[in-house]
Image: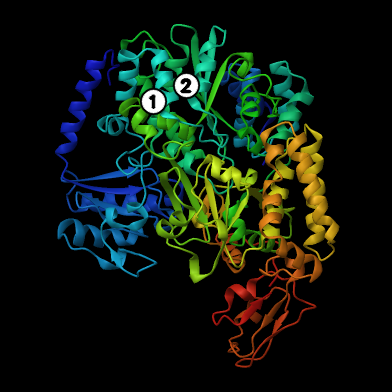
């Protein structure tokens, strides 16, 4: 849900204040915006550029260089699949494919109803649990393709486009 | 809490904490690092608190929640001291029984004990578990004794005594000399001698010097830095403060930064708390312990870019720029962060420093091999029984790590290879399993130490697929600044796509080798220069596997999707219909109690039938 524009700017001002309006802190500032919005809205980036006296393309460069940032809105539930080496050799690609099939979207995308996003991560550093999938901050270890369905069901929302 | 303003005050505080701790007789320890939490250790800890209260035991029994103990495989663990009884895979509902039987009645509950996968023997005591017993733990030794949120736990174990010694009893040059004599080399991958780096930074001209800790542990499969930052954050801070003093005191001001991976939220939290507490006690800030030396540390979160683990890219990221590396002819020790002299070391390197100051350089240099001193923490992951963090002296053989400590290969499969050094490293085949692991030996066989990830692979792992995995990984992570890395990886990926989809030719292998050599020579930073390692090492040791993909259009390990098919063994199939029920496309078909079949035209090779079959009837290959 989109919040009031005025609120947005006031919160943004507070974030900028916390980092002393320092250009050097731009990555931390973008992290904070993304924590609030779950992505980086263009409006916000333009506002930050103006206030920090930075060219907008420079901020765009940073926002697209770092994988943690997204310029596209994210869904209500974020399914993050670890693609680290240990997870890979234990079958992470098959888990990801099954998740993509179940949700009808590819990694990096969001379902049209804005319920689910699929993201991948290079390694969560919890290799003993591999393959790992993190849904809304909860870790699901030793994943196999056939477990994907029940994990999604635990988000307690009917899945759109689910195949029977 | 009072700010300490002399060494005497620190020692007085230490005595006070130790005498208070002695009064607590029984301690229950549970580890709440990332792995443990993911498996429910948080709930276990809550249940212990509740149960102690219910039994009115809060005064006799204390709970200590610590960082990771390194034996991820058996998390969540509960250890009961003073006996050191270790229970594995404990869940919240088990706590009641453990408190009642073991804590109150001193009875050992067999069902929670660890079983050695090699002998089948049940082991009750932490110190007798081979995984721990065969390690030499310097850096991980305290993780089970320290609640990372309590600086007092660290102080009780002698924490910050090395800092006291450095500030009051040693000159900066003497400290640098000790670190040089200890033979400490950078644990982040490069293996550069730490003391020499410190000396260069000290000598460099400039009124402000930056001291950086690289906590951007990006190698997939490596998590020792996470464990140290989460479990014993003060050892990193203490190392950095000593380093800052040695590098800057009397010559310049110093400012510290810790750059932590954005994927490690718990490490950020624990380090932030540690810095706050260190400031309150006066280990950080103005006039540290009344010595006249001032130093502060800030934490920066990364942005999820692998290349930022490269030192010059990390510094650009700290400046708020895109993390693109620069050529190394300008040394960071002269012109690093914001063009000031900068000393960057890895988490594990910093954590080694307090022990070197406490016990002396000769002691440290007595551990390890000729060219690599001290211990190294490896993260042993993949197809091995005992997944976890393994700390051993440099020069320990791979065989000892994988089999003696790691308990061998999962599911009785055959060992095939071990991948070291992350995407910059290579794959080491079975015939080199007796290789002593140190910086130089690994480089010699075409791999590298990297940050210390060891990924064990068995007969079901395809080496072409592993090489392809790293090429894809690096293609995505290449910053794109220089052509050999950016374009080389893209072309390599295309070649791999051909090979794994039965369109490869013999010429492709020659091309891969030529491309690899060009990337090694022509790339700007370490990422590009080492990027061909996974490809070249698998080509060197597993060429026949590449050839099988090309000549026979087969993946011998049964991994590459386009080259495999699923089938059902009619002799093993009981007709339970589980595969047919779960198959998303209706490819698995059959009647009840009659052998099923897979319609290859409908099969999308999702692997679900293989997972769900309880009779091992589904074949992949």
Residue B91 lies, in percent from the top left, at 36, 59
Tell me the element at label 1: helix
- Quadrant for the N terminus of chain A in the image: top right
Residue beneath the point at 47% across and 15% down: B247
Tell me the element at label 2: strand
Name the disc covering residue B141, or none: none
Whether residue A108 is visible here, answered yes or no, is no
> In this figure, which residue is indicated by the disc labeled 2?
B297
Q: Which of labels 1 and 2 is toward the front?
A: 1
Q: From this viewpoint, which residue is outermost toward the front?
A: B370
Q: How crowded is mark 1: few (under 14 residues within 10 Å), some or many (20 or more)?
A: many
Residue A21 lies, in percent from the top left, at 62, 17
Q: Residues within 10 Å of mark 2 (few under 14, many from 20)?
A: many
Residue beneath the point at 18% across and 53% down: B55
> Which chain's residue wears label 1?
B
Compared to residue B574, the image places residue A15 above or below, namely above
Compared to residue B74, the image places residue A59 above or below, namely above
Report the front residue among A158 and A150: A150
Find the distance from the CA under tag 1 to the CA under tag 2. Answer: 11 Å
């Amino acid at each position: 849900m989109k919040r009031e524009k005025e609120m947005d700017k006031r919160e943004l001002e507070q974030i900028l204040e916390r980092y002393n309006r320092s250009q050097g802190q731009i990555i931390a500032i973008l992290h904070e915006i993304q924590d609030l919005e779950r992505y980086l809205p263009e409006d916000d980036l333009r506002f930050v550029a103006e206030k920090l006296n930075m060219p907008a393309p420079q901020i765009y460069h940073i926002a697209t260089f770092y994988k943690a940032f997204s310029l596209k809105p994210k869904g209500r539930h974020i399914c993050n699949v670890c693609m680290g080496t240990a997870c890979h050799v234990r079958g992470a690609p098959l888990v990801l494919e099954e998740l993509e099939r179940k949700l009808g979207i590819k990694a990096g995308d969001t379902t049209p109803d804005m319920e689910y996003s699929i993201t991948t991560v290079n390694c969560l550093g919890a290799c003993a649990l591999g393959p790992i999938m993190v849904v809304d901050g909860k870790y699901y270890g030793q994943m196999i393709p056939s477990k994907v369905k029940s994990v999604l069901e635990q988000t307690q929302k009917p899945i759109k486009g689910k195949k029977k | 809490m009072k700010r300490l303003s002399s060494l005497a005050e620190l020692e007085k505080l230490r005595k006070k904490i130790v005498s208070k701790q002695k009064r607590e007789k029984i301690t229950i320890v549970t580890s709440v690092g990332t792995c443990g939490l993911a498996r429910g250790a948080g709930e276990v800890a809550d249940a212990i608190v509740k149960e102690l209260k219910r039994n009115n035991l809060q005064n006799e029994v204390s709970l200590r929640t610590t960082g990771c103990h390194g034996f991820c495989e058996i998390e969540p663990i509960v250890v009961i001291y003073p006996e050191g009884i270790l229970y594995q895979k404990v869940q919240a509902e088990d706590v009641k029984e453990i408190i009642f039987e073991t804590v109150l009645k001193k009875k050992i509950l067999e069902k929670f004990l660890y079983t050695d996968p090699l002998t089948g023997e049940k082991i009750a005591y932490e110190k007798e578990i081979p995984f721990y017993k065969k390690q030499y733990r310097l850096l991980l030794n305290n993780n089970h004794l320290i609640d990372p949120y309590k600086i007092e736990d660290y102080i009780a174990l002698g924490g910050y005594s090395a800092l006291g010694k450095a500030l009051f009893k040693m000159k900066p040059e003497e400290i640098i000399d000790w670190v040089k004599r200890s033979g400490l080399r950078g644990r982040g991958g490069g293996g550069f001698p730490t003391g020499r780096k410190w000396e260069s930074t000290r000598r460099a001209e400039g009124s402000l010097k930056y001291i950086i800790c690289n906590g951007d542990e990006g190698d997939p499969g490596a998590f020792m830095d996470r464990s140290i930052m989460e479990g014993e954050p003060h050892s990193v801070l203490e190392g950095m403060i000593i380093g800052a003093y040695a590098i800057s005191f009397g010559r310049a001001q110093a400012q510290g930064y810790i750059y932590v991976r954005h994927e490690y939220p718990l490490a950020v939290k624990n380090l932030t708390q540690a810095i706050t507490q260190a400031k309150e006690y006066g280990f950080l800030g103005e006039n540290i312990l009344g010595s006249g030396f001032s130093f502060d540390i800030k934490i920066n979160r990364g942005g999820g870019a692998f290349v930022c683990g490269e030192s010059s890219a990390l510094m650009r990221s700290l400046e708020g720029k895109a993390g693109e590396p620069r050529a190394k002819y300008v040394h960071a020790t002269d012109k690093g962060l914001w063009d000031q002299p900068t000393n960057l070391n890895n988490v594990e390197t910093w954590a080694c420093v307090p022990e070197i100051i406490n016990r002396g350089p000769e002691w440290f240099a007595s551990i390890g091999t000729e060219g690599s001193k001290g211990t190294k923490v490896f993260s042993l992951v993949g197809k091995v029984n005992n997944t976890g963090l393994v700390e051993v002296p440099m020069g320990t053989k791979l065989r000892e790590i994988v089999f003696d400590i790691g308990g061998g290969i999962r599911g009785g499969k055959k060992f095939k290879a071990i991948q070291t050094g992350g995407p910059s490293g290579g794959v080491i085949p079975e015939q080199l399993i007796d290789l002593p692991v140190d910086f130089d030996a690994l480089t010699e066989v075409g791999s590298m130490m990297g940050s210390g990830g060891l990924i064990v692979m068995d007969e079901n792992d395809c080496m072409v697929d592993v090489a392809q995995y790293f090429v894809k990984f690096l293609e995505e992570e290449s910053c794109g600044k220089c052509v050999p890395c950016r374009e080389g990886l893209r072309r390599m990926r295309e070649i791999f796509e051909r090979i794994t989809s039965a369109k490869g030719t013999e010429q492709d292998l020659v091309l891969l080798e030529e491309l690899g050599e060009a990337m090694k020579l022509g790339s700007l930073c370490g990422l590009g220069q080492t990027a061909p390692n996974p490809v070249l090492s698998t080509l060197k040791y597993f060429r026949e596997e590449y050839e099988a993909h090309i000549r026979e259009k087969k993946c011998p390990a049964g991994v590459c999707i386009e080259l495999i098919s699923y089938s059902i063994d009619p002799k093993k199939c009981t007709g339970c219909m589980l595969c047919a029920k779960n198959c998303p496309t209706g490819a698995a078909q059959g009647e009840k109690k009659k052998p099923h079949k897979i319609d290859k035209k409908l099969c999308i090779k999702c692997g679900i039938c293989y997972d769900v079959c309880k009779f091992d009837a589904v074949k992949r290959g």
